[in-house]
Amino acid sequence: MIQAIWRHFTHNYQEGGFRQVICKIFWRFHQWIWSDTVCLVYRQDLQEFRLEPRLPLTESALDFAAMHELEYFKAHAFPEAMQARLDSGELCHGYLLDRKLANLGWTSRGYLEIAPGVRIYEEHSIGIYDCYTFPAFRSRGIYTDSLIRMLRQIRHEGVSRSLIAVAPDNIPSIRAIEKVGFSPLYRATISQRFGRTRLRESEFRAGPQTQT
């Protein structure tokens, strides 16, 4: 526990010095006391999914050693958390271009975790989460291509549906998610009051959220 806290401190200090460390502490305290976090939840039915990838990406299932070697920052900053994900059966999918890690994403079977400890359960589904495109590879369609590859693999495994969530202000990700065929399911609001968490669902429509 102490080691994990120290890693968080070190990561934030390296990113932005003591100012970022202090801001992060106050932010976490505020989140615990009283906060509302919103995300948009999408679903993809895969029976008719036929999209093909267009980019020459190399796919690889990443274990912890591979994540570390390919310089995925979370493997260095939060190794215990990444190993815990793998130990729980979640999979890390890596997509390489010119032998460099360009994008990765995680999948979980039977549920989608939209926040720490907050899960949406759905039978016969796989959740896609924590996708990350490295800065040097952005604005090249790599996230879209990676989603297509993940969905093709999920369909090949015989799973009929996939779930994904995104922040309402993450316009590039929303566009990619909708481009590959995900349909809006609902808007999820995660309310935290003095450490107690509540999940509320409300309707939303694709369109206005994707406009700049």
Image (tube, rainbow, N blue to C red):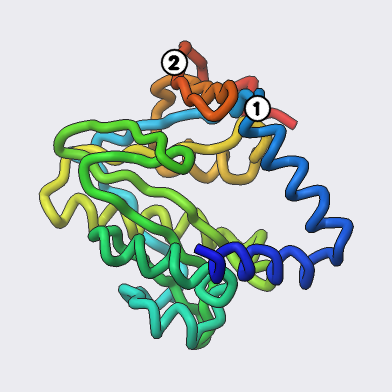
Task: Give how far across and how far down residue 171 sits, in percent.
Answer: 65, 38
Task: Give how far across and how far down residue 79 sits, in percent.
Answer: 48, 72
Question: Could you tell me if residue 39 is visible in this image?
Answer: yes
The secondary element bearing badge 1 is classed as: helix
Residue that sits furthest to the left in the current view:
158
Residue that sits furthest to the front in the current view:
2
**In the visual, does 36 lie left or right of 107?**
right
Q: Residue at x 26, y 48 (%)?
A: 50
Name the amino acid type tagged 1. Answer: Ile
Name the amino acid type tagged 2. Answer: Glu
Mark 1 or mark 2, whichever is nearer to me: 1
Nearest the viewer among 40 and 137 is 40
**In the visual, does 26 lie left or right of 17?**
left
Q: Is residue 114 above or below residue 76?
A: above
Q: Residue at x 19, y 50 (%)?
A: 155
Task: Give how far across and how far down residue 170 sits, in percent.
Answer: 64, 40
Residue 82 picture quarter = bottom left
What mark, if any, has residue 201 been given in the picture? 2
Quarter containing the C terminus? top right
Residue 105 picture quarter = bottom left
Label 2 environment density (alpha carbons within 10 Å; few <14, some 14–19, many ≥20): some
Task: Give how far across and how far down residue 154 sits, in percent.
Answer: 23, 53
Q: Is residue 24 above or below residue 3?
A: above
The secondary element bearing badge 2 is classed as: strand
Residue that sits furthest to the right in the current view:
19
Q: Residue at x 73, y 41 (%)?
A: 27
Task: Please tell me which of labels 1 and 2 falls first in the chain.
Answer: 1
Nearest the viewer among 161 and 25 is 25
| Residue that badge 1 annotates | 33
What mark, if any, has residue 193 been given in the picture? none
